């Protein structure tokens, strides 16, 4: 693994799977993640001892037995059974389609931030832009049963972060996740959906169109699970740890006191990532989780500036207008001139009418929304308020 470190116990030598891997390499990696009973920790021990998966599979069962149970050693040294052979064949066919990739722990472009995990995935299935995984990114998470305002906030912050040069990472779930993905695509950048199923399985099913749009708009769908994996409850905490690790920080928009989003935030904090939370009414159940995070040290967020000021070397220059402090001096609606009126208007029309770039317009609109001076409507349209 030239040019980057590997987690302890998983040093891998030899040529990486890479972008033009042979089918034997694909099959070998799949056998390590899909052999029943072979845990990820045990697979990493095998890689640390013997190198690449092909070298692991070339060992006699007696040599493997010291690191894994005898029964698993026997399975690894025998030809794959019908179920595993079918998965290998299915994955090889999936890889033949444009935009489909496997990224392994041995690849030079494996996301370095995932190596901070105690159990980084051995193999990532990526549908979309492979290089999106290396871009600066912020996770946005929150309640599945989001309020109308919560969904608007998620959309607005995602759009502004996208305009500021960040990929937005979320989990393709209902509520805040969906709003964050849509908001990121309304800005200048893209979004990454980390899912708890096989990359070829969309859950919930109603998000098929959203998943396709994420890929079509320059983002990516990411999963560590084999193709065809259904939505099992214990997979989603594993999905959440990738959301926590993949970005420079995590923004929690709405969360109940016992929300899974709080677990994602805790994991992010343990990994040294920044944690942000949007406050709300003391009477709102979906604000209580955010308030708890703020009491525990998460940064209270009211504007884009509250986030991007933590990453001065990563945010795009247009993220903050020169001389403006988004936290205390929201841009007036007149920044758009007559382009922003009381009748709904699209972002493209606002840019054309005001001369602002999409990035600057998205950032300004977020500030106006936070100040109550503008409102976002369905169809990515905006109107002046007050």
Image (spheres, helix red, strand yellow):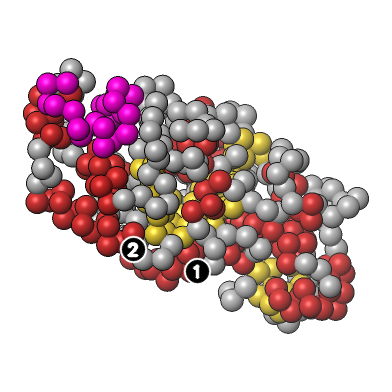
Q: Does 167 sit above or below residue 5?
A: below
Q: CA distance from mark 2 to mark 1?
A: 18 Å
Q: Does 369 sit above or below residue 81?
A: below
Residue at 29% x, 25% y is: 50
**Total numbered badges shown on the rendered structure:** 2
- Residue 188 in sight from this viewpoint: yes
Residue lying furthest top in this view? Answer: 66
Q: Which residue is mark 1?
A: 216
Q: Which residue is mark 2?
A: 96
Q: Main secondary structure of the magenta part?
A: helix
Seen from the viewer's position, the closer of residues 275 and 208 is 208
Residue at 87% x, 74% y is: 337
Picture coordinates of residue 184, whole percent (x, y) = 59, 60
Seen from the viewer's position, the closer of residues 104 and 24 is 24
| Helix, strand or loop under label 1 | helix
Picture coordinates of residue 40, whole percent (x, y) = 29, 32
* Magenta segment boundaries in residue numbering: 41-63
- Residue 156 in sight from this viewpoint: no
């Amino acid at each position: 693994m030239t040019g980057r470190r590997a987690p302890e116990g998983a040093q891998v030598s030899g040529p990486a799977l890479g972008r033009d891997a042979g089918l034997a390499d694909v099959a070998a990696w799949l056998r390590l993640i899909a052999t029943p009973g072979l845990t990820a920790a045990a697979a990493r021990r095998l890689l640390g001892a013997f190198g690449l998966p092909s070298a692991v599979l070339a060992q006699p069962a007696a040599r493997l037995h010291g690191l894994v149970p005898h029964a698993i050693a026997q399975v690894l040294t025998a030809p794959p059974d019908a179920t595993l052979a079918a998965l290998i064949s299915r994955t090889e066919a999936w890889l033949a389609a444009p935009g489909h990739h496997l990224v392994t722990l041995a690849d030079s472009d494996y996301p370095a931030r995932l190596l901070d995990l105690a159990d980084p995935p051995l193999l990532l299935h990526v549908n979309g832009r492979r290089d999106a995984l290396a871009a600066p990114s912020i996770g946005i998470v929150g309640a599945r049963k989001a309020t109308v305002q919560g969904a608007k906030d998620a959309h607005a912050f995602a759009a502004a972060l996208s305009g500021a040069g960040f990929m937005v990472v979320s989990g393709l779930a209902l509520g805040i996740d969906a709003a964050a993905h849509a908001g990121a695509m309304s800005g200048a950048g893209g979004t990454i959906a980390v899912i708890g199923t096989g990359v070829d399985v969309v859950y919930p099913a109603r998000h098929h169109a959203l998943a396709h749009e994420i890929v079509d708009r320059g983002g990516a769908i990411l999963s560590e699970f084999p193709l065809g994996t259904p939505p099992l409850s214990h997979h989603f905490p594993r999905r959440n740890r990738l959301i926590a690790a993949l970005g420079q920080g995590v923004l929690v928009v709405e969360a109940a006191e016992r929300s899974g989003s709080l677990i994602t935030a805790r994991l992010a904090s343990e990994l040294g990532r920044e944690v942000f939370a949007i406050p709300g009414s003391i009477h709102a159940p979906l604000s209580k989780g955010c308030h708890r995070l703020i009491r525990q040290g998460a940064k209270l967020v009211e504007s884009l500036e509250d986030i991007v000021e933590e990453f001065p070397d990563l945010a795009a220059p247009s993220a903050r207008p020169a001389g403006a402090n988004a936290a205390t001096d929201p841009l007036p609606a007149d920044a758009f001139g007559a382009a922003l009126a009381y009748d709904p208007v699209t972002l493209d029309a606002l840019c054309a009418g005001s001369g602002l770039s999409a990035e600057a317009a998205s950032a300004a609109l977020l500030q106006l929304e936070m100040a109550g001076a503008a409102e976002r409507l369905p169809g990515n349209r905006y109107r002046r308020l007050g």
